Image: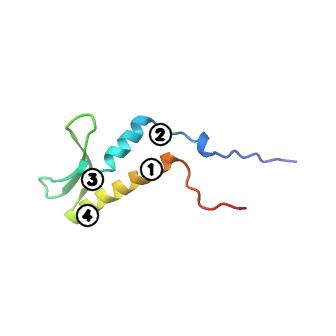
Amino acid sequence: MTFLYTRTNTWSSAPQPTEETIKYWKHISQKKNWRIVQLPNGFLQTEYKSIDSDNWIDVTRRETIAGAEQAIDASIEHYVKKLEFTKGPKVIKTFE
């Protein structure tokens, strides 16, 4: 007879983000830390400001301003969701 043992992870056993990572997510989830620059080839590049210095880190390249801004908004939305889950799991349904 064969038994199958499975391992499940709970919120407390999953790797938790460090304070430095959370600080980075908070920084990058604010639109004021982003900009769009035009490159010599005509493309537009999205960049965010480094936390530690005045350097700008390039992220994506797009053909239009609308596309570049949409990429920034999608990145911000992604990091806001990550920050929500640092508060713990979201309860979807409970049973009585």
Outermost residue, front direction? Answer: 96
The structure residue drawn at horizontal position 48% and vertical position 46%, both measured from the top left corner, is: 86
In this figure, which residue is indicated by the disc labeled 1? 82
Report whether residue 50 is seen.
Answer: yes
Circle 4 residues within 10 Å: few <14, some 14–19, many ≥20: some
Q: Secondary structure at mark 3?
A: helix
In this figure, which residue is indicated by the disc labeled 3? 31
Instruction: Tell me the CA gap for discs 3 and 1.
Output: 16 Å
Tell me: residue 86, above or below residue 18: below
Circle 3 residues within 10 Å: few <14, some 14–19, many ≥20: some
In this figure, which residue is indicated by the disc labeled 2? 17
Q: Mark 1–mark 2 contact, CB under 8 Å? A: yes
- Find residue 1 and report its horizontal and vertical position in percent: 88, 48
Q: Of 21 and 91, which appears nearest the observer?
A: 91
In this figure, which residue is indicated by the disc labeled 4? 67
In the image, 21: left or right of 6? Answer: left
Dot 1 or dot 4: first in sequence order is 4
- Find residue 37 and report its horizontal and vertical position in percent: 16, 53
- Find residue 74 and report its horizontal and vertical position in percent: 34, 59
The structure residue drawn at horizontal position 34% and vertical position 54%, both measured from the top left corner, is: 76
Three-letter amino acid code at the position of disc 2: Pro
Q: Secondary structure at mark 1?
A: helix
**Image depth: mark 4 or mark 3 in front:** 3
Dot 3 or dot 2: first in sequence order is 2
The structure residue drawn at horizontal position 63% and vertical position 62%, both measured from the top left corner, is: 93
